[in-house]
């Protein structure tokens, strides 16, 4: 099951990383970190809205499952 999961997710992860790199380069970002890895950061440095714009109508914002606060 893990091998199948990796098989299915690898192309998605590669595409996401390529898109993030493209958007970061086009907007002058030298480094990109996950928000979860940072304690403090300016909202203006959030790359996600730019990546969503690049994706166009295919971007989906994840929601929390019911029962999770």
Image (spheres, rainbow, N blue to C red):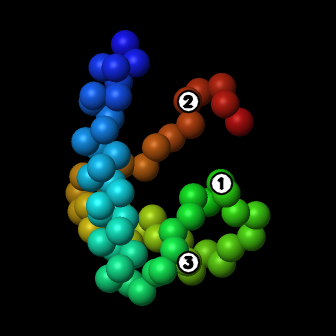
From the top left corner, tell me how far across and down residue 57 is, in percent. 23, 57
Residue marked by disc 3: 45
Report the disc number at residue 36: 1
Quarter placement of the C terminus: top right
* SS of the residue under disc 1: helix
- Identify which residue, 31 or 64, lies in the foreground: 31
Q: Residues within 10 Å of mark 2 (few under 14, many from 20)?
A: few
From the top left corner, tell me how far across and down residue 25 is, in percent. 35, 80
Q: Are marks 1 and 3 in contact (CB under 8 Å)?
A: no
Sequence-earlier tag: 1 or 3: 1
Quarter placement of the N terminus: top left
Sequence-earlier tag: 1 or 2: 1
Any part of residue 13 in sight: yes
Q: Residue at x 30, y 50 (%)?
A: 14
From the top left corner, tell me how far across and down residue 24 is, in percent. 39, 75
From the top left corner, tell me how far across and down residue 43 is, in percent. 61, 75
Does residue 1 appear to the left or right of 46 in the view shown?
Answer: left
Distance from label 1 to label 3 (Cα)?
14 Å
Q: Residue at x 57, y 58 (%)?
A: 34
Any part of residue 51 in sight: no
Q: Residue at x 40, y 18 (%)?
A: 2
Q: Residues within 10 Å of mark 3 (few under 14, many from 20)?
A: few
Specify the quadrant of the image occupied by residue 44: bottom right
Distance from label 3 to label 2 (Cα)?
27 Å
Report the disc number at residue 65: 2
Does residue 40 appear to the left or right of 65 in the view shown?
Answer: right
């Amino acid at each position: 099951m893990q091998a199948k999961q990796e098989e299915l997710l690898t192309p998605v992860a590669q595409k996401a990383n390529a898109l993030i790199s493209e958007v970061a380069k086009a907007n002058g970002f030298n480094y990109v970190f996950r928000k979860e890895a940072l304690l403090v950061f300016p909202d203006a440095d959030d790359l996600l809205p730019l990546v969503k714009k690049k994706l166009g109508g295919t971007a989906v914002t994840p929601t929390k499952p019911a029962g999770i606060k």
